[in-house]
Amino acid sequence: MNDKENRRHEMFMRVRDFGVEHAADFAPTSLGTQLFTKLGTVVDELGIHSASQSSSSGTEKEGTVTRSQARRALRDDMEAISRTSRAMAVEIPGLSNKFRVPHVENDQNLLTTARGFATDVTPYVDNFVAHELPAGFVDKLNESIGELEAAMGMQSSGRGHRAAAIAAIDDSIDDGLTTVKKLDVIVKNKYSNNSAVLAQWTSASHIERDPHHHKTSTPQPTQPPAPGGAPPAP
């Protein structure tokens, strides 16, 4: 959650605790009790959604790093095959045309091309091995394809879960603010003759302002002095 959302979450916790402290003043089935209970649920939900957002954000970042590494590994495998095919093209004309590595950084295009490599290289495996590529180079190529696909899936999954958590946080905060607004009327009516409790309520339901937000005054332009040292016209 961002700072604004955290400040609201903290306010909800203070209001929930206020309700717990003064629970004996409200009938178990009263609207006030129901609303304080509902706010407690909102607090719990926000904790869950916040943890989910943090976890999914970490998954997305991990997927981004892993995707970059997997892309590089796959491209290295493909470059080795392409480089070798150019040497083999002397005996097998046109072979190098089957193994051109795309220059554009597009992972889907890279994967499609790599799968083509894995298919087209099959009849020539012995020739490639004779040029000192490892005997399992096709298996390594397929492993690199799978690793890039998995990294892309991890990144996409993390991004999707993070978006869902953010939407859930927004919904819970809206629900909490509506609940506190309703409670504000009930508490002020309930304790209209108890200034101490009302002061406690005001403190609990207050949302702290952004400590970095402050109004700055814009300096007014000054008129240059008139020629000859005369004071500027009013």
Image: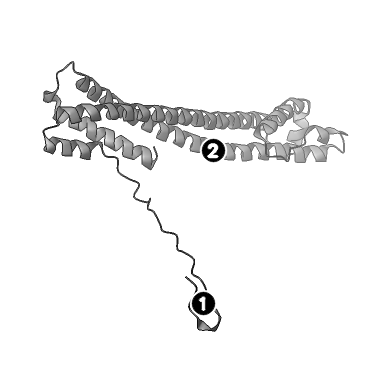
Residue 136 percent location from the top left of the image: 66, 31
> Where does residue 96 sit, x and y in percent of width and height?
82, 36
- Where on the picture, by quarter, is residue 172? top left
In the displayed structure image, the side of residue 115 where residue 154 appears, left or right: left
Q: Is residue 64 above or below residue 223?
A: above
Amino acid type, residue under disc 1 in the picture: Pro
Category of crowding for the residue at label 2, using alpha-carbon neighbours closer than 10 angstroms: few (below 14), some (14–19), many (at least 20): some
Please give left or right for residue 71 compared with residue 206 in the image: right
Residue shown at the point (77%, 34%) measured from the top left: 99
Frontmost residue, 40 versus 88:
40
Q: Which residue is identified by label 1?
A: 225
Q: Residue furthest front?
A: 234
The picture places residue 32, in percent across and down from the top left corner, at 21, 22
Mark-to-mark CA distance, 2 and 1: 60 Å
Q: Nearer the viewer, mark 2 or mark 1?
A: 1
Q: Amino acid at mark 2?
A: Thr
Task: List the single residue furthest toward the bottom.
Answer: 228
Residue at 14 percent of width and 28 percent of height: 22
Q: Secondary structure at mark 2?
A: helix
Q: Residue 146 is drawn in which quadrant?
A: top right
Q: Is residue 127 left or right of residue 171?
A: right
In front here: 123 or 180?
180
**Helix, strand or loop at disc 1?**
loop
Name the mark on residue 64: 2
Q: Is residue 9 above or below residue 40?
A: below
List the single residue furthest toward the top. Answer: 29
On screen, 43 above or below 234? above
Where's residue 176, x and y in %? 32, 28
Q: Is residue 45 visible?
A: yes
